[in-house]
Image: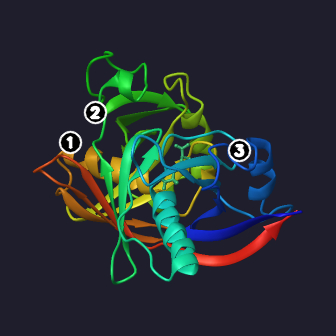
Amino acid sequence: MGIAFRKYHGLGNDFVLIDNRHQAQPLITPDDAVKWCDRHFGIGADGVIFALPGQDGTDYTMRIFNSDGSEPEMCGNGIRCLARFIADLEAAETGTAGSVYTIHTLAGVITPRLEANGQVTVDMGLPRLLATEIPTTLGSPDQKVIQHPLEVAGQTWEVTCVSMGNPHCIIFVEDVAALPLETLGPQFEHHPAFPKRINTEFIQVVRPDYLKMRVWERGAGITLACGTGACAALVAAVLSGKSDRTATLELPGGCLHIEWRDTDQRLYMTGPAELVFMGQMH
Ligand code: ZDP
């Protein structure tokens, strides 16, 4: 007997989605997720996402396993895919679907909204900025980490740290295309300054409202897009005086629209989420 799945992507950041609405225990293990995500021996994905029953009054719960089997607290592109997945399931079952969902995650309640034009806008919540909240040993525990020097690969980088529930460090560079991301990424991810490892975003400011980004993700390596990373990058750019509070983030897989709203200090991310195929895994 196989397990039914659907594959979705948000700007090429691709996920296997599992309908787990009937039980709180994920239908597959982290080890299974590693096999399913393998691009040669499995389905191929950056992670596996479960739609689980809601908790504390939320509509649903999201959990995600990275392609290395580790479990992140949040996933921005993934939660857009989850919202589309749930709406697709509901529509197939009842003929109608919701358009706003409250989702319980390890990073708090996140609220995606399906727009009429096919895009998904997500209230990603508040950024966390103190060193202990990232977590990182850089700077003092109760202070922000902005443009702080960090030695990696024989070079000193100025890093800014932002948690969107999951940990990010952001570095501004002249030319993102020129970076050897495959060799640099793992050295940031496993640097002792980051006890829970780290997602690393390199940002090129093209204009105050247009940033180019490349990402090395914790537990997944180079990906074509990262929603939490794009939100973290905009926060870092605003804190460093490099961008407006609303900007387009150009990632290898396409563009996300990100707003750090000044009225409520929350991040709003808008981007696509698309079904690729459905299948059954043995
Ligand atoms: O924090 C981590 O371990 C990430 N690999 C989680 C996945 C983040 C994601 N790419 C996003 O869009 O936020 C899904």
**Residue placed under numbered mark 3 in the picture:** 68
Residue 15: x %, y % from top left:
62, 62
Is residue 209 shown to the viewer in this render? yes
154 relative position to 247: left or right: right
Image quadrant occupied by the C terminus: bottom right
Which marked residue is nearer to the observer: mark 1 or mark 3?
3
Q: Which residue is mark 2?
A: 146
Q: Of the residues shown, which amino acid type is indicated by label 2?
A: Ile
User: Contact, CB < 8 Å: mark 1 with mark 2?
Assistant: yes
Q: Residue furthest front?
A: 94
Q: Quadrant of residue 256?
A: bottom left
For the residue marked with disc 1, what is the amino acid?
A: Leu
Q: Position of residue 191 (x, y in %)?
A: 56, 28
**Could you tell me how far apart the alpha carbons at marks 1 and 3 are, in whole angstroms?**
32 Å
Q: Secondary structure at mark 3?
A: loop
Q: Secondary structure at mark 1?
A: helix
Pointer 1: what residue? 239
Observer-side mark, 3 or 2, equals 3
Tell me the residue at 81%/53% (across/down): 35
Q: Tell me which numbered mark, 1 or 2, is placed earlier along the sequence.
A: 2
Q: Identify the residue shown where x is 35% and y is 24%.
A: 131
In the image, 268 versus 110, the foreground residue is 110
Amino acid type, mark 3: Asp
CA gap, disc 1 and disc 2: 8 Å
Please give left or right for residue 129 compared with residue 227 in the image. Answer: left
